[in-house]
Amino acid sequence: MLGSGKGSNFVALADAIGAGQVPAEVAVVLSDVPDAGILTHARNRSVAAEFLPPGCFRTKLDEDAERAYIARLQAAEVDLVVLAGFMRILKGDFLRAFPLRVVNIHPSLLPAFPGLEAWKQALDYGVKVTGCTVHFVDQGIDSGPIAAQEAVPVLDDDTPGSLHERIQQAERRLYPAVIAALARDRVRVRGRQTSVGS
Ligand code: GRF
């Protein structure tokens, strides 16, 4: 699992694994932020957790860093790379190392509101329904084939904070369910078309 932030999706996944709902284990958590909450949550649960420096760019890994991330994940023999708030764009070499094995969760109903602060984009636009999307990662930004989505209502008195929290509650349901389906080999992908069994 790769993350840069507080780690609520890691906690949800770890809880679901602990409850026997996801036949998987988190082999390692990597972060580009030394004091990210996700690293603390992982260590508290005795999951290997490491800060790997991202290199000299702001929005992507530099070449050496990308090689280090790939090597660490391959050494852990991961079957799946789960992004949870990892704030770096992953490029060709990384994606080729894990073909159709990198998934992400985004806090909107894609293709609406890709990019940063999607809940705020939704609120500013005035949509009545938003949600979250689990998708396979390709070279674009939040543009890969969609595996699953959950809708979330936008309420009249929502603030960015209250809407984000409601979306994150949906994320904590949807992501473990999709990862369980992937672990059970119940996910098929043909081009942009996917099917996710239970
Ligand atoms: C999630 O809200 C996800 O939609 C976005 O990054 C956030 C990560 O949150 N991609 P957390 O670190 O899992 O709490």
Image (cartoon, rainbow, N blue to C red):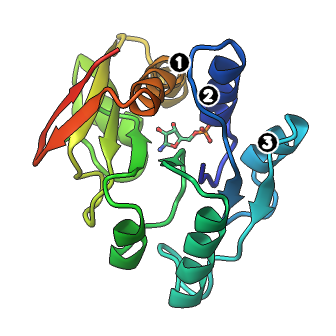
- Residue at the image position 28 percent from the left and 18 percent from the top: 197
| Quadrant where the C terminus is found in the figure | top left
Residue 108 seen in the current view: yes
What residue is pinned by disc 1? 169
Mark 3 secondary-structure assignment: helix
Residue 13 bears which disc, if any?
Answer: 2
Q: Which quadrant of the figure has residue 148?
A: top left
Q: Return the residue nearer the eye: 72 or 32.
A: 72
Q: Position of residue 23 (x, y in %)?
A: 57, 25
Give the mark nearer the N terminus: 1 vs 3: 3
The amino acid beneath tag 3 is: Ala
Mark 1 secondary-structure assignment: helix
Ligand 1 lies in which image quarter?
A: top right
Q: Is mark 1 within 8 Å of ligand 1?
A: no
- Residue at the image position 73 percent from the left and 45 percent from the top: 38
Q: CA distance from mark 1 to mark 3?
A: 20 Å
Residue 90 seen in the current view: no
- Residue at the image position 10 percent from the left and 48 percent from the top: 191
* Left or right of 65 in this view: 184: left
Q: Nearer the viewer, mark 1 or mark 3?
A: 3
Q: Are marks 2 and 1 in contact (CB under 8 Å)?
A: no
Mark 2 secondary-structure assignment: helix
* Left or right of 162 in this view: 144: left
Q: Is residue 123 above or below residue 40?
A: above
What residue is pinned by disc 3? 42
Q: CA distance from mark 2 to mark 3?
A: 11 Å
Q: Is residue 5 above or below residue 68?
A: above
Q: Position of residue 180 (x, y in %)?
A: 47, 25
Q: Are marks 2 and 3 in contact (CB under 8 Å)?
A: no
